[in-house]
Image: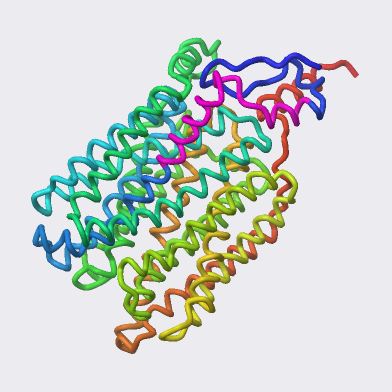
Amino acid sequence: MHKVDDPEPGGPPATVNNAAEIQERDLERLGRERPAAFHGALQEVLFCSSLLISMFMAEYFISGFNIILPELSRALEIPPASQTWPASVFALVTGAFLLPFGRLGDMYGAYVVFNFGLVWFSLWCLVGGFSRNYEMLIATRALAGFGPAAFLPTGVMLIGKTYRPGPRKNLVFSLYSAFAPIGFFIGIITGGLTGQYLSWRWWFWIGAIVLFLVCVASFLTIPNDYFNSSQRNNNTQGKAAVQMDYWGLATIVPALVLITFAITAGTHAPHGWKTPYILVTFILGILLLGAAVYVEGWVAQQPLLPFDLFGPKYMGRLVIALFFSYGVFGIYLFYASAEIANVQGASVLMTAVWFAPMAGGGIVLATVGGFTLHLLPGRVVILISGAGSLVSVLLFALIPPDANYWAYVFPSMIGATVGVDITFLVANIFITTNTPSHRQGLAGGLIYSVLFLGISFFLGLADLAVAENNEKRGHDGNHYKVAFWLATACAGVTFLIFATIKLGKAESELTVEEKAQLELEGASRPN
C-alpha cells in the first residue's frame, strides 16, 4: 500500500506521494474514507450540518419572504408598485457578488469568508425583523444579500477541497443539494405560520436564531485554512499569488446588477421596457458586460472569470445547459405558486403543503443518489434530470382549473425536484472535480452565478411574456400558461444539450493536481 499524505487542516484532500504508482484500490479507499482534516465523526457531522443548514437558510429567506410580504406591506404601508423591490433586491445583491467572494475565498481561505458570510447574514436578518419603514427594509434586505454571496460559493469550496472525488463526496453534495428544496418548503411554512399566528417579524428572528447556531457550529468544526492560504500567497516561489481582479470587479459586478435590475423591473416599470431608466440601465449593463469580456480575456492577469476555467471537455456546454435549467426552475417556482394559489384556489398554508413532495423528494434523491451516483453513467443521470424538468413544467402548461392534485401537481413536483436536485448535484461534482484546489472558490462562484442569473433572466422573460399576453387577451384564467410554455421550450433546449454531454461515472479518481503530476512525470521520463 502506498503512503498517503495527510492534508493540512482545510487544505486539499489527501494525495499520494507518487501519482503514477497509485492503484485502483487506493483510489477507492480514499474516495470512501473520512478526510484526515477531521479529528472524528462528530466534527465531520457538525461540519456537514453547517454547510447544509447554510444552504437551507439561503432558500428559507428567499421563499418565505414572498409569503409574509402582504402582511409586511400592510404594516409598513408599502404601496403595491413598490412591493417587488424588497423581494428582488436580496437576490440581486447576492447574485452580483458571488464571483468576488469566491475569489476572496481562494485568497484568504474558505474558513474566513464562509464564517464572515454567516455572521453578516444572521446580523442583518435579525435587524430586518425590526424594520420600521420601507427604506429600512430595503437596506436590511440588500445588506443581508452579501451574506449568501460569501457563504454559498465558499460552501461549495469547502466540500470540493475537503473531500476527494468518490462516493463520500457524492453523498455530501447530494445532501447539500437536497437541503435547497427543504429550505424552500420550510420557508413557506414558517412564513405562513408566523404571518397567521405571530407576526411577520418572527419570520426574520427565527431565521436569525438558526443562523446564530450555525455560526457557532461552523466556527468550531470547519478546518481553518486561513494560514495555509496566507502561506501559499506569501511563498509562491516566483508564481503570482492569488489576487483580486479589480478590473473584473469594476466591470462584472455593475454589469450584472444593471442587467438583472432591468430584466426584473422592466415589466413593472410605468411604461414597461419603454421606460427610459429601464432602457438606460439595460444598455449600460450590456456595454459593461462587453467591457468585462475584453478585460477578462486580454487585460486582467488573474481574471475573476478566466476563460480556461471552461477548458475541461463539456464544461462550456454544461454551463449553458445549467443556465437554461435553472431558468426553468425559477419560472416553475414562481408561477406554480401563483397557479396553485390564484387559479386552483389553495390557501397559503395549503400551497406550502402542495409543495411538500419537493422537500420529500429531495431527501429521497439525496439518500439514493449519494450511494449510487458512482455506479451510474453521468449522461444517464443528467438525461433523467432533464426529463424531470420537462415533465414538471409541461404538466402545469396543460393543467385545467380545479385540477386533480395527484394527476397534475404531485407528479409535477416530483419532476421538479428530480430536475433541479440532480442537475445541481452533477454540476457541483463535475465542476469541483475538474477545478484545481486554488480555484475551488471560483468554481463555487461560477456555480451559483449561473443559478442566480438563469433564474433572474428567464423569470424576467416569463414575466414579460405574461404581461404581453394579458395586454392582448386579458386575464382569462389561463394567463400563467404562457410562462409554462416558455419554460417547456427552455426545458427542451436543456434536454437536447444534456444529450450531447457524455459524462462518466462519479467514481473515485485522481485530483486535478495528481493528474497534472502524473502528466509531468510521464513527460520527464526518458524514451
Question: Where in the figure is residue 286, as x and y percent of width and height?
Answer: 37, 54
| Relative to 286, residue 20 above or below | above
Q: How many marks?
A: 0
Q: Quadrant of the C terminus?
A: top right
The residue range painted magenta reads 26-54
Camera-side residue of 245 and 400: 400
Relative to 118, 242 lies left or right: right
Residue in view at x 32 percent, y 50 percent: 61
Residue in view at x 41 percent, y 52 percent: 452
Q: Quadrant of residue 340?
A: bottom left
| Relative to 417, residue 305 above or below | above
Main secondary structure along the magenta-highlighted residues: helix
Coloring basis for residues: rainbow
Question: Where in the figure is residue 231, as x and y percent of width and height?
Answer: 48, 12
Q: Residue farthest to the right?
A: 527
Question: Where in the figure is residue 401, as x and y percent of width and height?
Answer: 41, 86
Q: Quadrant of residue 421?
A: bottom right
Q: Residue farthest to the front?
A: 197
Camera-side residue of 474 and 356: 356
- Magenta segment includes 439: no
Residue in view at x 44 percent, y 52 percent: 182
Q: Quadrant of residue 169?
A: top right
Residue in view at x 48 percent, y 64 percent: 328
Question: Where in the figure is residue 433, as x and y percent of width and height?
Answer: 63, 36
Relative to 455, 389 lies left or right: right
Q: Quadrant of the N terminus?
A: top right
